[in-house]
Image (tube, rainbow, N blue to C red):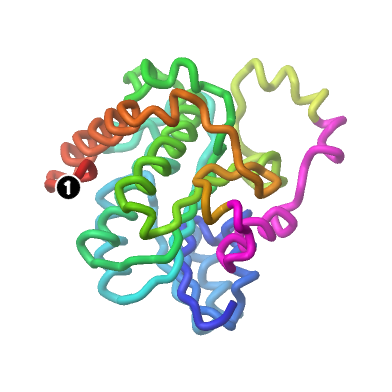
Amino acid sequence: MKNKTILVVGGTDGIGKEIALKAGSDNTVIIVGRSRDKGNKLLKEYPNWYFYPTDLSEMKNVVELAETIGTDHQKIDYFVHTADVLLDKRVETEEGLEISIAINFYARVLLNHLLLTKFHITPSRIMHIALAGAPFGQKTFMNDFPLAPEVSSSKGHMVGQVANDLYGLYLQRALANKINMNILNPGIVDTDIRRNGELPAMMKWLMPIFSLMRPFMETKPHEYAEIPFAILKGQNKVANTNVLISPKGRKAKVSKVVSNVQNQNTVMLSTENRLNNIINTKIDLIK
């Protein structure tokens, strides 16, 4: 792959960084991340890249980011979202969102929408790293979304992952397959969020067992990045005809909750209302 422009949100660490590195100097990579030091270090190695330091937990920052990227770049071939955070106890943003779902769902939806509709940037593919097809939280999702004020960040993270699935299927349908949309489940990858993220109390009890199994279950970020990068290069035919992709790059299971069109529309209408209230600007996610 050469002479492409790739937006990697969360590209200073983990899977996002490895996807960016695979693109290398043959392509223009637009990196979004929180760490200025890490971003500037990448720019020294790849001077044809761009770096936009951004706190994605605040939607006002996402709006400013979209304005900057949309002004600086008229053509972007791929949107790749990998930014995430894993906390246990609830952390709320200044805008009233639980921080996990703010980063791994609302910020992704808002940035995509602004770049697509306000700046008319049409990528050939949009990719979200989430937990595509994972069964966790699916049965109760429609009762859990939108999040109640007292819900923990660990619950917010799980709900945000499922919301990505519904959004991916909705957007593919809304765009009439004009843009390939993929939600990827990376499985267990040895990233900072896995090593340093906060786990619920129940999961902490299981960590000694998981530590013994980790060498057999876990992959390194550069190893897993081969799968999304192959999709970007058009080498995975499954990803061209399916939205949800498993850790092995195959078709992921689509549950009845996620595939239900009414559920997808309900989630998007709720998301539209929440974002409009926060950024005080009318956006239309539902067409």
Q: Residue drawn at (57%, 73%), measured in percent from left and top?
A: 42
22 up-or-down from 287: above or below: below
Q: Residues within 10 Å of mark 1 (few under 14, many from 20)?
A: some
Image location (x, y in percent) of residue 256: 47, 24
Q: Is residue 26 left or right of residue 248?
A: left
Residue 237: in magenta span: yes
Residue at 86%, 38% in the rendered image = 216
Instruction: Report the residue at 32% width, 69% height from top.
Output: 69
Q: Is residue 34 visible?
A: no
Q: How many marks?
A: 1
Point out the image quarter for the N terminus.
bottom right
Dominant SS of magenta comes to helix
Q: Nearer the viewer, residue 255 or 205?
A: 255
State whether residue 79 appears in this view.
yes
> Magenta segment range?
211-238
- Tell me the SS state at disc 1: loop
Residue receiving disc 1: 283
- Percent position (x, y) of residue 227? 66, 56
Q: Nearer the viewer, residue 69 or 198?
A: 69
- The image position of residue 139, as x and y in percent, is 48, 16
Residue nearest the observer in this picture, 198 or 11: 11
Q: Quadrant of residue 78?
A: bottom left
What is the three-letter code of the residue carrying label 1? Ile
- Find residue 23 and report its horizontal and vertical position in percent: 60, 73
For residue 131, side relative to residue 96 (left or right): right
Please say if 49 is above or below 11: below
